[in-house]
Amino acid sequence: LRLELVALARAAGLLSPHAPREWGGLGLDHRGMAVVFEAAGYSLLGPLALNIQAPDEGNTNLLNKIGTPAQKERWLRPLVAGQIRTVFSMTEPDDGAGADPSLLKTAARADGDDFVIDGRKWLITGVPGAALNIVMARTFDAAGSDIGASMFLVDIDAPGFRIVRQLDTIDCVSPGGHAVVEFERVRVPRS
């Protein structure tokens, strides 16, 4: 259904109004986006159809702002085209981070040219069928010093990443639903 809705939005010239033109979006300013987002919000499926549903909308902006040219080609272009979906993994169980990244328990430790991520997240939207996982983790340098929270771009099929279980929620419009996920020695290149 998502792909069908995205194709209809593309045909109508309404796909990815928030994304820059150079990556295939409409490149609307904030006022234009507000009008389109409001109209899309009259339907539970509107944001999904226009490719502006969370977490993809925010992840589009994030990748556009901080992604390298190679990362933008690999993930931003197909995301703006509605060909892939993304995940944002921040919330944690057991007194972990919700909206406060200072409470993160998931850790990323420097190991040579990589970081190794260990931890558990929950209420993560859209994991099944996604391509990219943007992971928030407390970061430690090679000396073991806590250097704060960082975001890591992790392939959804990275070894050591797994879905622990799907959660029962009342939300029925998020492809892939919501899940508890685990990172066990997930290696991410420093780049």
Image: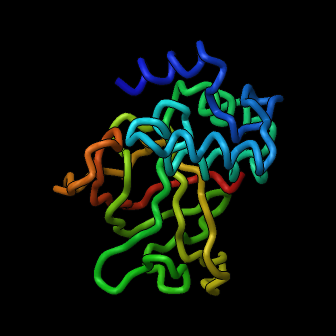
Q: How is the image coloured?
A: rainbow
Q: Position of residue 182 (x, y in %)?
A: 33, 60
Q: How many marks?
A: 0
Q: Name the residue nearer the viewer: 98 or 67.
A: 98
Quadrant location of the N terminus?
Answer: top left
Could you say which quadrant of the image residue 56 lies in? top right
Residue at 31% across / 50% down in the picture? 162
Q: Where residue 22 sits: x, y (%)?
A: 83, 29
Pick the residue in front: 46 or 92. 46
The x and y percentages for residue 15 are 62, 27
- Residue 17 is situated, as x and y percent measured from the top left of the image, at 68, 35
60 relative position to 20: left or right? left
Q: Nearer the viewer, residue 22 or 70?
A: 22
Give the left or right position of residue 73, taking residue 96 as reference: right
Residue beneath the point at 50% across and 50% down: 54
**Residue 118 sits above or below residue 159 on the image:** below
